[in-house]
Amino acid sequence: MKLLITGGAGFIGSAVVRQAVARGIEVVNLDALTYAACLDNVASVAGRPNYTFVQADIRDGAAMAGVFATHAPDAVMHLAAESHVDRSIDGPAAFIDTNITGTYHLLEAARAHWAARGKPRDFRFHHISTDEVFGSLGETGFFTEQSPYQPNSPYSASKAASDHLVRAWHETYGLPVVLTNCSNNYGPYQFPEKLIPVVILKALAGEPIPIYGAGDNIRDWLHVEDHAEALLLVLEKGPVGRSYNIGGENEMTNLELVQRLCAILDRLRPGPAPYADLITFVADRPGHDRRYAIDPARIRAELGWRPSHTPETGLEQTVAWYLDNETWWRALQARKGVGERLGAAR
Ligand code: NAD
């Protein structure tokens, strides 16, 4: 199988690329190399005969048509996106352009390629999305595949729009699609503006560790390698038109998460005082969703998926990875906006 993966120089895309290449799948990694990309994330597979990198922008319809003509993929996994909620608050335009218009151009290029090959039933367009499209939960309940769409941030609204486009391209044109909506990911290679790397790197620098609001927002955390495995499983076994929610069943308040990270750092890299002393509460994110929690019953029952990392092992491995990979994160910290408070304005 020849698999086109978009966004493969990012956090989750690179995990999918590494796993797919390791399984012997022929992978074409398409990425525009925005501020959030890092080719070091895929350096371990760069020389492999079953790996190709293409720098291209999904907003460029002609370029997308060219990529399909040149590489003739049997399947697409679409992860390229603007992905940081705080940046979407300060500058929503890039989210509309990439996540909505870019997905449209990719869908059209995929549809033309699929039609030109005689509309094979085993072609796949796998759209990778987030549980944030479902909005915010109260204290109880879970997101299922039937949950109504109620996005609250420009990021989640743009991802919701892209989900709808993918669904429509299936219903209207018959394009064989599958969709997945996943909870918060963590693990190695996460860009240093996201919560977990921010906490680790602020702690190591001895700087205040910012927590939005009272730190009582709840997220359901999943290790990125477990997500990548789930995605490859859905690509291989998911029936056309089906969507799957993917989550770790690991709910934590942001404050609990930060305290756990501080405790791990206290053990692995003891400082002069407990790292939790650096915790500082700052103004909340506008429209900050209260709680996300996934019910993964469908992917478990239909495809037999189960995550292999627990938060205990996964968070410790992640902290250790950041301690061992300072050169990687130092280079990214120099990029525009990283380390600054973004998305605070109403
Ligand atoms: P990321 O920001 O780390 O990576 C995104 C990648 O897409 C980058 O390499 C970037 O260069 C590329 N890209 C951006 N715009 C592009 C364009 N116009 N053309 C081509 N490439 C472009 O994001 P991530 O955290 O790895 O998320 C990947 C996908 O998974 C996104 O679609 C996101 O919505 C979804 N998702 C993320 C999470 C999470 O917790 N991070 C959870 C669920 C779903």
Image (spheres, rainbow, N blue to C red):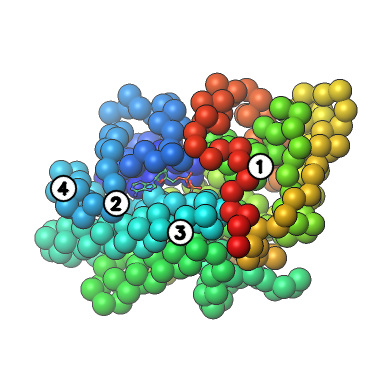
Q: Earlier in the sequence, mark 4 or mark 1?
A: 4
Q: Secondary structure at mark 1?
A: helix
Q: Residues within 10 Å of mark 1 (few under 14, many from 20)?
A: many
Q: Secondary structure at mark 3?
A: loop
Q: Position of residue 239 (x, y in %)?
A: 38, 67
Q: Residues within 10 Å of mark 3 (few under 14, many from 20)?
A: some
Does the Cβ of the disc 3 residue fall within 8 Å of ligand 1?
A: no
Question: What is the quadrant of the C terminus in the image?
Answer: bottom right
Give the distance between the C-alpha atoms of the residues marked 1 and 3, in whole angstroms. Answer: 23 Å
Query: Label 3: which residue?
Result: 92
Query: Is residue 20 visible in this depiction of the protein?
Result: no
Q: In the rendered structure, which amino acid carries the disc numbered 4? A: Gly
Q: Position of residue 241 (x, y in %)?
A: 37, 70
Residue 269 vertical position relative to residue 30 in the rendered view, above or below: above
Query: Label 1: which residue?
Result: 196
Query: Label 2: which residue?
Result: 58
Asked whether the residues under the numbered discs 4 and 1 touch, taking CB atoms below 8 Å apart as contact, a structural biologist would say no
